[in-house]
Amino acid sequence: MVYDMKLANFILMATLLTAAACAPKQQTPAEPSALDVIASRKSVRTYTDQPVSDQQVETILRAAMAAPSGMNVQPWRFVVVRDQAVKDVLAGGFNKMIAKAPVVFVVCGETTVQRRPQGEAGAEPVLMENHNWTADCAAATENLLLAAEALGLGAVWTACYPYDDRMNPAREVLGLPENVTPYCIVPCGYPGGDDQPKDKWKPENIHYDKW
């Protein structure tokens, strides 16, 4: 009888192991590829009350700072705004969505850079105008938007530079230094609607070798 019980237990264990090996494997959801995130990015203008965590903010800013930069100057500067009074000022009379977002990123650019004059290798660096700052900040902003999309958040690029009626209030309420200019304002949060990406593919906008 003892032998029969041992044999039965062995057969039962073997049967269970065989069944587990033959069972269909559960697939974990695949992470979206970079191309998937690019294709799914959209402008989100309404948000829920769900907060955006500090870790999410850092992840988004790390992505923004991974953008390309002319001569690697990296002129971008970021102000993360959660304070409601500050958001109200940034929203002004043109973008109420800024006031309603859980978190707002103000992308700024340092407009001057310390650089040696061309052709003077031994010269001391001098303060010069950085003509690339807007392009660099644009690249950083796009990375920021894509990172928000990848995290399941929604965001929208709202213009600030070069409009004085938007830049001046932002400068004042954020206390920006003289050589730092607010480039754009990006409200961000969990989508409150069902925004869908737009298909912007237009082959007629492409030219090969020459116009």
Image (cartoon, rainbow, N blue to C red):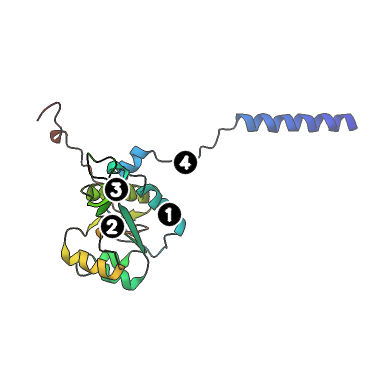
Give the alpha-carbon distance from disc 1 to disc 4, as whole Å. 24 Å
Which amino acid type is shown beneath numbered disc 2?
Cys
Q: Which residue, given by chain and number where applicable, does mark 1 sit on?
A: 58
Report x, y in % for residue 85: 32, 73
Report x, y in % for residue 138: 25, 49
Q: Is residue 106 above or below residue 3?
A: below
Give the alpha-carbon distance from disc 3 to disc 4, as whole Å. 55 Å
Quadrant where the N terminus sits is: top right
The answer to which of marks 3 and 4 sits earlier in the sequence is: 4
Residue placed at 73% from the left, 29% from the top? 14
Give the alpha-carbon distance from disc 4 to disc 2, as whole Å. 37 Å
Which-is-in-front pick, marks 3 and 4? 3
Which-is-in-front pick, marks 2 and 1? 2
Residue placed at 88% from the left, 29% from the top? 3
Residue placed at 61% from the left, 29% from the top? 22
As helix, strand or loop, the secondary structure at mark 2 comes to strand
